[in-house]
Amino acid sequence: MNRGDVVLRPTPECRLPAEREGAPRLIEIGFGNGDFLVDLAQKRPEALVYGVEVSHMCLEKALSRVARLKLGNVRLLCGDARFLVRECFADNSVERIYMSFPCPWPKERHARRRVTSEGFSALLASVLKIGGVFEMATDEAWYADEVERILGSHAALKLAERRLNFRRGITTKYERKWLDMGKDIHHLYIEKTAPWSVPRMVEGSVEDMHVRIAPAVPVDLELLDRTVTGRTGSAQGRHGEDSHWAFRGGFCAADGTLLEETICTDSGYEQKFYVKIVSKPECTLVKLDGVFAPFLTPAVRFAVADAARRIREQ
């Protein structure tokens, strides 16, 4: 199997390739070593099984297993699941979403990373089909209680079932181990009951994003460092995203263009890339470098516009 058939890179507009029309779509968030993911794909050959994982090492391990077993119905995505699931999957397109033993982040300062944090229940309610289910397993009773209370109270979701120490037909190595040790395992099934939608952050492609400064403004590395490097900014996107950006340092590329290292976050989703400054006789272009092209989120748009403004006003 070709690596590119399994590991997906969404389009610049953050869309996935259209394939197997009508096939059920299943997602596992945080697939770890791939036990559950592979078992699920084998038991549901008619479905497309998507795994989303932030760890590159876990992705490589799962990819090796998928290739060895020749599982043609598995697709892997590497990155922040909160962003990728929302942006890549359409409303009402997913039959089931699984999470097995996500970190409960017990410290209060880490609470925003839990599945009970703001926005996650709306994400589930958006991409799941009516009657679709979010299934979560945890060994922390307090976390199960919190998930039941917060996700179950969403207007388009309900707690369909909660089971204690249930042995699923598809499970994980650690789940089997903990059950054999007598440790309590909580399974929660949250069902979508009504239509729901959330706005997507990515709008357009990076190729569309550039600012033209005319007449041309002579820009050199010293000017870039003085006017742009070290600057930061923040704003709110039109859908309420908390967007932040910072310019980290300027470089001169081999072709003489200037690059400004930039980091952006949109409601916690982080991207690193280069803003590119191209000097032409008739104008100066400020755009995104295509080598490490980010998704076009509000913070990226704000950053390019801010860099252009600072250059124009120098």
Image (spheres, rainbow, N blue to C red):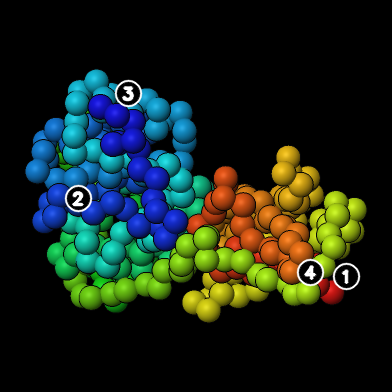
Q: Which residue does the numbered mark 4 point to in the structure image? A: 216
How far apart marks 2 and 3 lie (CA) works out to 22 Å
How far apart marks 3 and 4 lie (CA) works out to 51 Å
Of the pair 259 and 164, the residue shown nearer to us: 259
Indicate which label's residue lies in the foreground, 2 or 3: 2
Left/right placement of residue 270 relative to residue 47 reads right
Q: First in sequence: mark 3 or mark 4?
A: 3
Q: Residue at x 82, y 67 (%)?
A: 217
Neighbours of disc 1 within 10 Å: few (<14), some (14-19), many (20+) = few
Mark 2 residue element: loop
How far across and how far down the image is residue 180, in percent?
24, 25
Q: First in sequence: mark 2 or mark 1?
A: 2
How far apart marks 4 and 2 lie (CA) works out to 46 Å
Neighbours of disc 2 within 10 Å: few (<14), some (14-19), many (20+) = few
Pointer 1 and pointer 3: residues touching (CB < 8 Å)?
no
Indicate which label's residue lies in the foreground, 1 or 4: 4
Mark 3 residue element: helix
The amino acid on which the numbered mark 3 sits, given as a three-letter code, is Ser
How far across and how far down the image is residue 37, in percent?
25, 36
The amino acid on which the numbered mark 4 sits, given as a three-letter code, is Ala
Q: Which residue does the numbered mark 2 point to in the structure image? A: 19
How far across and how far down the image is residue 107, in percent?
56, 50
Q: Which residue does the numbered mark 1 point to in the structure image? A: 314
Indicate which label's residue lies in the foreground, 3 or 4: 4
Residue 254 lies in quadrant: top right
Q: Which residue does the numbered mark 3 point to in the structure image? A: 64
Of the pair 11 and 146, the residue shown nearer to us: 11
Q: Residue at x 27, y 48 (%)?
A: 27
Of the pair 297 and 44, the residue shown nearer to us: 297
Indicate which label's residue lies in the foreground, 1 or 3: 1
